[in-house]
Image: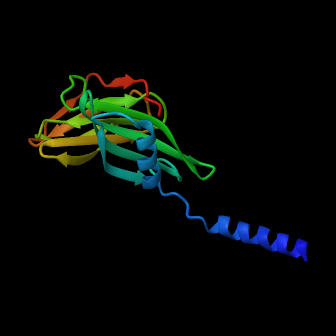
Amino acid sequence: MKRQIAIGFFLFILLLSGCAKEQTFEEFFHQKIKEIHVGEKNYSYSLIDTKLNVVSEDDAIAVFKEQNERGEQIFIAYFKKQDNQWEWKHTRGSEWDTPVKWSAMHQPPYIYSGPISDNSITEVFVGKEPGIIMEVENDKRFWYAISPIQDNEVFYIREDGTREKIEEVEHEKNINN
């Protein structure tokens, strides 16, 4: 009888563990960012956008703003799910008014990104890959493109149709979280 109760209890625990709700990407993101910045004063963030399965199945990117001691910054981060757990792989950030605005992550996937303060820019390309331009707030916009190629040509197109190549894209080391 005790053995039957023990087996029944074991099966009940297995059933409960199988019913546990898997953590969504957004839940993971909010939990992780709070852990990273626990105890920081004058810190806030807002999640601007997320995309799942961007390069392969079970990966994601997040675009988010932070208000911290350096001022307002915008970031793009790459995540990969391994063994049913999200892992924060690498991050690239920029300040809105920094001289070097456009950059790329130095390891695959090569994510090119940056803020756009020139309202006449209508499109951005990395090689043949069109960038995604998003409105963040007021006149602040942010773009990103994912390329399989490092050191790819980056150019933008203005409202009048002129095309301008970006002579220098900063390949910055990642910020691991």
Quarter-of-image position of residue 26: bottom left
Depth check: give the residue in front, 96 or 56.
Answer: 96
- Residue at 38 percent across and 24 percent down: it is 171
In the shown orientation, is residue 85 left or right of residue 14? left
Relative to 69, residue 49 above or below: below
Quarter-of-image position of residue 6: bottom right
Residue 130 visible in the picture:
no
Is the N terminus in the top left, top right, bottom left or bottom right quadrant?
bottom right
Extreme left residue here? 160
Extreme bottom residue here? 1
Relative to 169, residue 49 above or below: below
x, y (%) of residue 83? 63, 50
Depth check: give the residue in front, 34 or 73.
Answer: 34
- Residue at 10 percent across and 40 percent down: it is 120
Depth check: give the residue in front, 8 or 67.
Answer: 8
x, y (%) of residue 18? 66, 66
Relative to 49, residue 125 above or below: above
x, y (%) of residue 13? 72, 67
- Residue at 31 percent across and 34 percent down: it is 41
In the shown orientation, is residue 113 left or right of residue 98? right
Relative to 150, residue 55 above or below: below
x, y (%) of residue 55? 47, 47
Residue 171 visible in the picture:
yes
